[in-house]
């Protein structure tokens, strides 16, 4: 139904399988979580429109020069957030509804250039085509506060605390 009226309109993306849905890529996208075809989200052609999305589920990818759905935003429960893509998303009760499931530290970066621009992250090619991971020694630091345990850090032969910043 059209809001405010008495008119019934057809569902724009009415395909009942992934193959049919993907055959209409301009308007439709397959939702693996819901197992259904739905109208494509974040279809903006400029950064300003993308970043001002009313649902706050879009982000402008500077390198790909396109608007994309923010990682982890489809997950609305803690269980979904932490199990659908293990290690990729984190649940934060302190955030407002719709923003509680966010990318784990460094997982928001999809390219080596963006990854290495963040001092907490490093690019790993252990899994093709590559992923952005938290630097090895940062495991001794609290990801939310960036406070590091100097003793644990300095006991690891591969790590050392930076005296000027107290970061491992």
Image (spheres, grey):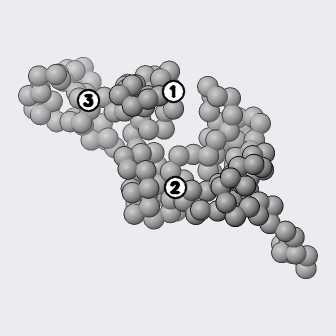
Is mark 1 in CB contact (under 8 Å) with mark 2?
Answer: no
Dot in front, 1 or 2: 1
Location of mark 1 (residue): 111
Location of mark 2 (residue): 99
Closest to the observer: 112 or 97?
A: 112
Q: Position of residue 3 (x, y in %)?
A: 83, 72
Q: Position of residue 163 (x, y in %)?
A: 20, 20
Q: Spatial distance from mark 3 to mark 2, Cα to Cα? A: 27 Å
Q: Spatial distance from mark 1 to mark 2, Cα to Cα? A: 23 Å
Closest to the observer: 135 or 17?
A: 17
Location of mark 3 (residue): 136
Query: Can you name the residue that lies furthest to the bottom here?
Result: 6
The secondary structure type at the circle numbered 1 is loop
Residue 5 found in image quarter: bottom right
Residue 4 found in image quarter: bottom right
First along the sequence among labels 3 and 2 = 2
Is mark 3 in CB contact (under 8 Å) with mark 1?
Answer: no
Instruction: Give the residue displayed 68% in from the left and 52% down from the top.
Output: 19
Instruction: Give the residue displayed 43% in from the left and 22% down from the top.
Output: 116
First along the sequence among labels 1 and 2 = 2
Instruction: Give the residue displayed 39% in from the left and 63% down from the top.
Output: 79
Can residue 118 be seen in this snapshot?
no
The secondary structure type at the circle numbered 2 is loop
First along the sequence among labels 3 and 1 = 1
């Amino acid at each position: 139904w059209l809001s405010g009226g008495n008119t019934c309109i057809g569902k724009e993306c009415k395909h009942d399988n992934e193959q049919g849905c993907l055959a209409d890529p301009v308007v439709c996208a397959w939702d693996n979580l819901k197992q259904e075809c739905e109208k494509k989200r974040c279809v903006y052609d400029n950064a300003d429109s993308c970043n001002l999305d009313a649902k706050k589920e879009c982000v402008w990818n500077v390198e790909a020069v396109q608007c994309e759905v923010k990682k982890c935003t489809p997950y609305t429960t803690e269980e979904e957030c932490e199990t659908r893509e293990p290690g990729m998303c984190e649940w934060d009760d302190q955030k407002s509804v719709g923003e509680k499931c966010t990318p784990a530290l460094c997982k928001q970066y999809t390219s080596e250039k963006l990854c290495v621009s963040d001092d907490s992250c490093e690019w790993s090619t252990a899994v093709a085509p590559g992923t952005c991971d938290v630097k090895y020694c940062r495991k001794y630091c609290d990801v939310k506060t960036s406070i590091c345990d100097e003793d644990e850090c300095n006991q690891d032969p591969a790590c050392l605390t930076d005296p000027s910043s107290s970061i491992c």
